[in-house]
Amino acid sequence: MLTSFFSKSTPINFVVIAVYMVIFYVMATLQSGFEPTVGNIFKEVIVLLLFILSSVLIDFIAKRNEVTSRNAYKTILFAAFACMLFRVLQNNDVIISNFFVLLALRRVISLKSQRETKKKIFDATLWICVASLFYFGSILFMGVVFFGIIIHVSHNVKNWLVPVLAFLTVLSLVTCGNLAINDSFYSFSDWFQPSNFDFSQYRDLSVLIPVSFILALSLWSLFFYMGIIQRASSMLKSSLMLFLLNFFLAIGVAVLAPTKDSSELIFFLAPLAIIVTNYFQLLNDKWFQETLLWVIILLPAVLLIAF
């Protein structure tokens, strides 16, 4: 059974998931009018690796902080959700930005150890600033950093100054790089992406169907996730709350996105994978669990064939 296979976290699970991600990524890239030059192939391979590493990073964060049991549900769910939203796979910037946001989330969650706190805050802020260079809206995830400081290390005033230092560091590096390459200063207009509230592309069935499915699953799973948070220990509760905050900030990023084509929902998928995995772990009806997992995994292929 499919649930039995993914209920374990083994190398073969990751190989299967990686192959699944590669197949859909290659199809999406070819569908977008890909020109097979050396430069383009190199660029797409790098982005594909970051896409796969994002799923590995989700698994690492979950295992390290025990926010889920040791299984491969969260990785296959992240992969399947991303592959449902074909435009995610065609937008290199959001894939790169999401990878850096996950790196930041890993550092913020690790603040609970109370070790090397300033270094972790600096790293998390730096990764989010780098993510915002590729996708401006991801700067909203600074909320995760500040929330992490509040619940773990707010007692030290110096910790609140570290994000400012990290931001200035990224600004200095980007300005120097821009001066060296383009002989001009990096301005706010180069960084900022204005919001666009045109949701007309969501009327397309290839977008509407997966988005509706994901949102319905999100709302249902959140109900159970809230109960898990209430029952969790204080240490685990902080990690679960950070994923929940990440989930809601991702909604904010999507609402304020410059283009509404569903690629902006990628930031929503990692916390959703954790939330749905926790729901999966509570299910006692094995047949329903099996059917739901089959639907999630096969839906990207159905959408690809239908549209």
Image (tube, rainbow, N blue to C red):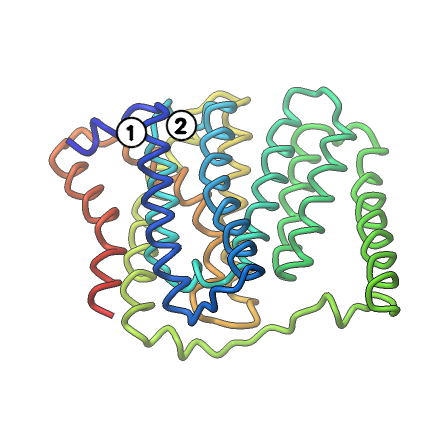
Query: Residue at the spot x=27%, y=30% of the render?
Result: 6
Query: Residue at the spot x=50%, y=44% of the render?
Result: 49
Q: Kindly indicate the quadrant of the structure image that contains residue 301.
A: bottom left
Q: 236 or 65: which is nearer to us? A: 65
Q: Residue furthest left?
A: 287
Q: Secondary structure at mark 2?
A: loop
Query: Residue at the spot x=65%, y=70% of the render?
Result: 193
Where's residue 299, x and y in %?
23, 54
Q: Kindly indicate the quadrant of the structure image that contains residue 136.
A: bottom right
Query: Residue at the spot x=43%, y=65% of the render?
Result: 262
Measured in 3D between alpha carbons, the distance from the residue under mark 2 to the one under mark 1, in whole angstroms, is: 8 Å
Q: Secondary structure at mark 1?
A: helix
Where's residue 194, x and y in %?
64, 73
Where's residue 146, x and y in %?
69, 42
The quadrant the C terminus occupies is bottom left
Where's residue 76, x and y in %?
33, 40
Q: Mark 1 = which residue?
A: 281
Task: Specify the amino acid type for callout 2.
Answer: Thr
Location of residue 307 with respect to 73 vertically, above or below: below
Task: Specify the amino acid type for callout 1.
Answer: Gln
**Pointer 2: residues within 10 angstroms few (<14), some, or many (20+)?**
many
Location of residue 224 with respect to 303 vertically, above or below: above
Residue 196 got which mark?
Answer: none
Which one is earlier in the sequence, the residue at label 2 or at label 1? 2
Tag 2–tag 1 contact (CB < 8 Å): yes
Q: Is residue 14 left or right of residue 244?
A: left
* Tally of numbered tags: 2
Q: Residue furthest front?
A: 38
Q: Mark 2 = which residue?
A: 68
